[in-house]
Image: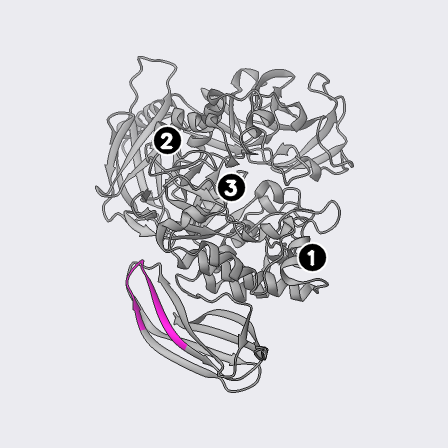
Amino acid sequence: MKRATLGLFILFLLSSCQQHPDQRKLISLNGEWEITKTDTFAIMPQKFESKVPVPGLVDLAKPALDTSRLYKNDTYWYKTSFTIGQDYPDLIKLKIGKVRYHARIYLNNKYVGEHLYCFTSALFDIREFLNPAGEKNELLIGVGAVNNMPDTVIWGSDFEKLTYIPGIYDDVTLILSGSPFISNIQTVPLIEEKKVRIVADIDNPVSDKKISLSYMIKELKTGKTVAKGKGKSKDFEVSIPGCQLWTPESPVLYELTLSTGADEKRVRFGMRSFSFDPKTGRALLNNKPYFMRGTNVCIFRFFEDPDRGLLPWNKVWVTKLHEQFKSMNWNSIRYCIGLPPECWYDIADSLGILLQNEYPVWTGGREGFSRIYPGVTSEHLANEYRAWLPEHWNHPSVVIWDAQNESVTEIIGEAINKVRGMDLSDRPWENGWSAPQSETDPMESHPYLFGRYRRGQPPSPRGPMADFFVHIQVPGNSAQTNFPREDRSRYPNPIIINEYAWIWLNRDGSPTTLTDRVYELAFGPNLTRDERVYLYTRHLGMLTEYWRANRFCAGVLHFCGLGYSRPVEPRGQTSDNFIDINNLVYEPLFVKYVKPAFNPVGLMIDFWDRSLQSGRSGITLGIEVYTINDLDIPWSGPITLTLRPDSGAVSTQIKEIEIPAYERLITTFPLDIHSGPGIYWLEAEINYQGESIKSIREFTVEQAPPPERR
């Protein structure tokens, strides 16, 4: 290269560096921090004698700080240090993912600020508090306890929790960048046009400085660039050639890189739309009907599980957890009364799971909200929602903003309406037991039929299932008027059943505090562990079949996929279905009887009697078998009905059926029982993708007493 040419090349490089300084750099502060505690925020710590992982909770401190495990009044002080070994860029920010309860930040003994919200991230400008480049900086974060929260902030009341363990339970990160700084990006899929709308929030301290945006969109999996160019404003649209839609069955993700020349931010997104059709009561994914089948995760309850440890922050474990959920034919999860760490949402995006994303509000009936949160107005709550939505609005997995659980108050509806327009994708909102705020918003229903036995009501000789369904089985959407009173079903909105059953067992098979009397009254005294597990899984499977087969719900979500298990005092109220939480091993009978009930092509024997009486001529029945098709294509094949007595001949009937896409078919089989008294099993079976899917009923036949002589 000639000298003159080389000189021009060097000048070009220098000018390029001046025009495009180093863009955003992220430095993780996760790891082992020091920790101690004082009585209040007013008392600064003098020494640190314990260590704790970040992210995590204060109960992970070693040596332990609080052996009482009450965590109600103290202040916990986290300390770490860091060095930035480079010249400081224009902006240096500290992002703290999520902190329970109340964070106060000091850097190099200088007060930086505080963050009151327990479930959303905090971002602080810290450049002015730093020591000179290359020198060590000391970061101190005081974390409050739940009893010290102001009454204007939601702290996550849960009637079935004991401990509210404080801690920094999400990532802590330093953000180094130039200015203008991209504070947030909202991606808005426009699937009909095969475009994505990009809306950027940009902090520009020099207001008259023109902002020039450039973008690049890649397929996340392949790294293939599908679009790049310049944005003419902070709100623009980009075409995506060969656009692939995101679904749970095909979770295609894209990555957007947006740059101001001085700062660069990356976000992942998926091309999908989601809504509810108020006429059919069904969910629409990418403008096509889609039935939600799934479960719940109560992450804050799992936080107090004795075997929890570091599992919620182990990405391998969290990924396997969601894979186990999908293995049960589930495509949906409600993150219930709690928001997990951000990596959980990334994993749901990647694996393909629809999320009902529930803000941690549970206050019960009409007086509950004002009693638990006396200072919270609709504007206070709306401010928390304003901080919440930008955290999650790029996740294709997040399809429903769930404002609360089982609470009745006008305040929450008012808060929803204050923030609804922020989400340009216009996701639906669910408002618990309060009034839906739009005709296209779903409402939750919790038909806890077995709960009546907790109140001492014994079943009839026909059995509990026959008791339930003789009262509420009404075809079509009119059945919602027969749901339990507490489900507030007077609203005509689409329904999601995201809790049902009330027959929980702990992981060791013992009853919970809510189910002691249920098992005794519904099924009999002195049951063994194996008998309880069999009864639980069989009846949960039958309830699932019923709610799905009658087709008056947009979704059926079992409660719950992950919670605590507290079999010893103080015992817990609910539990999940694992027998080994560390290795995520399900109870085998749960898989055997519940997984088929959630199959995309499912079936239900509409027969609920526990016992029948046989006369001299035997018993003649007409058995209706419901088959349902969640697929967007017809399904056809044979359906087999088999009667198996404990003694005598097995009888089998086979019929060929075809179920249209998204529809239900009812097939009637004549059934004659002449084998006499004994135990019988009735099995309906189809074959789906090489797997046997069965609906099973077990009943006894008794000889009817002879008529009395006159």
Q: Which one is closest to the eye, mark 2 or mark 3?
A: 3
Q: Residues within 10 Å of mark 1 (few under 14, many from 20)?
A: many
Q: Nearer the viewer, residue 408 or 583?
A: 408
Residue ID at (39%, 39%) = 491
Which residue is rendered at x = 49% and y = 29% of the image?
A: 409
Q: Which mark is residue 510?
A: 1
Asked whether the residues under the numbered discs 2 and 1 touch, taking CB atoms below 8 Å apart as contact, a structural biologist would say no
Few, some or many residues within 10 Å of mark 2 (<14, 14–19, 20+): many
Is 213 left or right of 22, judged from the image as shown? left
The answer to whether residue 448 of the structure is visible from this angle is: yes
Q: Is residue 690 visible?
A: no
- The x, y position of residue 374, in whole percent, is 58, 22
* Residue where numbered disc 2 is placed: 185
Callout 1, which amino acid?
Ser
- Residues drawn in magenta: 657-670
> From this viewpoint, which residue is outermost toward the left?
193
Residue 202: percent from left, percent from top: 37, 23
Residue 276 among magenta residues: no
Residue position marked by numbered label 3 in the rendering: 486
Residues at circles 2 and 3 in contact by the CB criterion of under 8 Å:
no
- Residue 362: image quadrant is top right
Q: Amino acid at mark 2?
A: Ile
Give percent across and percent down for residue 387.
Answer: 46, 27
